[in-house]
């Protein structure tokens, strides 16, 4: 069976939420991070999960997290998302076939999306959960003046999980992760073929205060809450 490791960046400071530690925010009765981990722990191909936490949290991790599942480990994160992912990848076992990266701040990812992305990576390519753009998108200059309107039909939002053959993701991160806002960009840059997997647009990242309202409503609508 395919051996899958999961790297979960959870070391951010939640600046756009007003300094809230998003992974530990309770939504529908459970921490955001627990919602984010469950669909991975439900996949029997997942053999290890490493969560990158802030220095304070990794020194004193919450009891619910250390007790959640024997496959879950904790590492200290870095100054950027990329640095946190890199540390989590380094702490995963070395004999994996596939590595998935999933933001702790995405509590709504479904088991079906996780499984579909792992299937693509197990077959040798990369996979990114996301959805087609529903709004017309603009590129602008530094002052906000529009300089182009790219054809919407080919634009997608990139979410997580982002899942790759393990050796490809390790090579991608070895070539530097300073400027990347996602993992696929690093893989694309070294020639990995990556495809989008439609998550239906119901896999938001808890980023701004109103996202909490949306995420909680979606969780409850799914019957996933107290
Ligand atoms: N992350 C991380 N290490 C960092 C920065 C971010 O592990 N140094 C993680 C966050 O915890 C989150 C994911 O990367 O799960 C996506 O980042 P984002 O939504 O931007 O979270 P924050 O960086 O915490 O939020 P903000 O940018 O508003 O400060
Ligand atoms: Mg951030």
Image: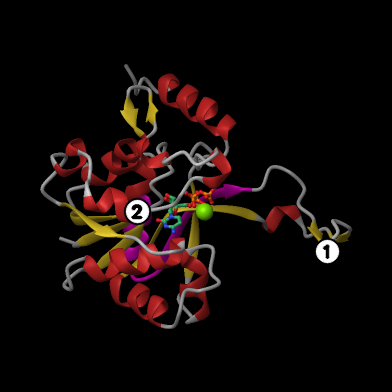
Whether 201 is drawn above or below 44: the answer is above
Whether 93 is drawn above or below 38: the answer is below
Determine if the magenta segment contains residue 143: no
Tell me: is circle 2 under 8 Å from ligand 1: yes
Using the rendered view, name the quadrant where residue 41 is placed: top left
The numbered dot on residue 128 is: none
Quarter of the image containing the N terminus? Answer: bottom left
- Magenta range is 116-132
Residue in front for this viewpoint, 144 or 136: 144
Q: Earlier in the sequence, mark 2 or mark 1?
A: 2
Q: How many marks?
A: 2
Kindly tell me whether residue 178 is visible in this rendering.
yes
Determine the residue positioned at 29% across, 41% down: 39
Determine the residue positioned at 84% across, 56% down: 144
Kindly tell me whether residue 109 is visible in this rendering.
no
Whether 29 is drawn above or below 20: the answer is above
Q: Residue furthest left?
A: 70
Q: Residue furthest top?
A: 226
Rounded to the nearest whole Å, what is the CA distance between mark 2 and mark 1? 34 Å
The numbered dot on residue 54 is: 2
Q: Is residue 90 left or right of residue 23?
A: left
| Image coords of residue 109 (percent x, y) | 40, 41
Determine if the magenta segment contains residue 125: yes
Task: Decide: few, some or many residues near mark 2? Use Cα within 10 Å; few <14, some 14-19, many ≥20.
Answer: many
Task: Decide: few, some or many residues near mark 1? Use Cα within 10 Å; few <14, some 14-19, many ≥20.
Answer: few
Q: Are the residues at dot 2 and dot 1 in contact (C-beta closer than 8 Å)?
A: no
Residue in front for this viewpoint, 19 or 188: 19
Please name the residue that numbered disc 1 is placed on: 141
């Amino acid at each position: 069976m395919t051996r899958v490791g999961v790297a979960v960046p959870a070391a951010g400071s939640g600046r756009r939420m007003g300094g809230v530690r998003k992974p530990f925010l309770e939504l529908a009765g459970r921490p955001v991070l627990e919602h984010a981990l469950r669909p991975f722990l439900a996949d029997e191909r997942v053999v290890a999960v490493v969560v990158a936490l802030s220095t304070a949290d990794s020194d004193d991790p919450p009891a619910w997290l250390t007790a959640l599942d024997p496959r879950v480990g904790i590492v200290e994160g870095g100054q950027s998302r990329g640095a946190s992912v890199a540390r989590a990848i380094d702490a995963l076992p070395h004999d994996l076939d596939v590595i998935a990266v999933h933001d702790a701040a995405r509590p709504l990812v479904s088991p079906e999306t996780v499984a579909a992305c792992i299937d693509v990576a197990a077959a040798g390519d990369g996979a990114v959960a996301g959805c087609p753009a529903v709004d017309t998108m603009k590129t602008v200059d530094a002052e906000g003046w529009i300089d182009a309107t790219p054809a919407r039909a080919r634009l997608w939002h990139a979410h997580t999980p982002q899942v790759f053959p393990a050796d490809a993701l390790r090579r991608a991160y070895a070539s530097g992760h300073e400027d990347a806002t996602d993992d696929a960009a690093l893989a694309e840059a070294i020639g990995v073929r990556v495809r989008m997997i439609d998550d239906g647009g119901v896999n938001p990242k808890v980023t701004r205060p109103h996202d909490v309202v949306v995420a909680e409503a979606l969780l409850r609508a799914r019957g996933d809450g107290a």
